[in-house]
Amino acid sequence: MDALSDVLRVLRLTGALFLDAEFTAPWCAISVAGHPRSGFFSSADHVVFFHFLIEGRCKAKLVDGGAAVELGAGDALLLPSDDSHLMGSDLHLAPVVSDDLVHPTEPGGIMRIVHGGGGELTRFVCGFLACDKRLSRPVIDALPKMLRVPFGGNAAAEWLTGLMRLGARESSMPRPGSDTVLAKLAELLFVEAIRRYVESMPEQESGWFAGLRDRYVGRTLALMHDKPGEAWTLESLASQVGLSRSALAERFTGLIGQPPMQYLTRWRLTVAAQKLRSEPSSLAAVAEHIGYESEAAFNRAFKREFGMPPAAWRKTARAADAV
């Protein structure tokens, strides 16, 4: 399994398309960070929002600054850190709060927005993905606060756009199984957006995604993720990827922002946290799986990383999942 797939698996991404929005020019709406958490959101530790444009065009901008981006049909806009942002045909207009515009199509139905001045139509599907922020650092921390991902221009993109159109129809006319269909579509969009982001990054970029692309660092990450319980050393990793110890340490730290062995320790504990949350394995078995020879050493390391012993983590995480 490659490192990106492994990280996404551990994140336990869940989600569903939840809102079909139609705006007509002129319009401007603001989505506010830290929105009230109800329903699904009440148990979500971290939420990644996205908007997928089905039709029309608009602009988007973070409230706390930065340049506006132009969006057109087939574009996705990701907000990995739930930042407040503006969207509209004219961002200089006084914005309305998007939460105030939401209403169900029917009692218990999918939520919708219909708003604007009656001019040019812009239609998009909003969605969310939830994950545990403590387990999501490699991905969430490496993404910009707002990310435009164009999906137009080739057969694969047309296929994905078609699936999002299916999602919009599914949202408007829910049927048995719709929740599962919409959740998978939301996850598919997120994963494909990340892949395209990685492919489009400038060569001089640093960070976890840049590390994935690097010939040596990417291979090192793959080894760590494939066998987290292996007794890796800097020397054994360097030997596997064909670099000296010093060259690998410098290259890895320069791209990832931390030394290889520190990254390995944090990844092992992330894997342990996911296993504690989703499997009935004993603490000793989890510790052995990630390469700890004693349960006591595992307990100490886990508490340093997550702020509580593994047994307490398991109880707290499972209680949250049950909500």
Image (spheres, grey):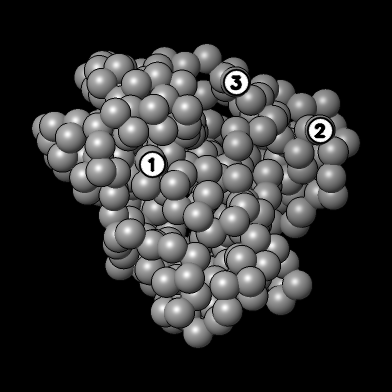
Instruction: Identify the element where label 1 is drawn.
Output: helix
Rounded to the nearest angstrom, the CA distance separating label 2 from label 1 is: 31 Å
Q: Nearer the viewer, mark 1 or mark 3?
A: 1
Amino acid type, callout 3: Gly
Alpha carbon of mark 1 to alpha carbon of mark 3: how far?
A: 25 Å
- Crowding at dot 3, Cα within 10 Å, few <14 / some 14-19 / many 20+, comes out as few
Instruction: Specify which label sits upstream in the sequence, 1 or 3.
Output: 3
The residue singled out by tag 2 in the image is 64
The x, y position of residue 94, in whole percent, is 83, 26
Q: What separation in Å lies between label 2 and label 3 (alpha carbons)? A: 14 Å
Return the residue at label 1: 270
Residue type beneath disc 2: Asp
Looking at the image, which is closer to me, 100 or 132?
132
Q: Position of residue 100 (x, y in %)?
A: 59, 18
Label 2, residues with CA under 10 Å away: few <14, some 14-19, many ≥20: few
Which of disc 1 and disc 2 is earlier in sequence? 2
Residue topped by disc 3: 34
Question: Residue at horizontal 72%, vertical 67%?
Answer: 205
Check if mark 1's residue and mark 3's residue have beta carbons within 8 Å: no
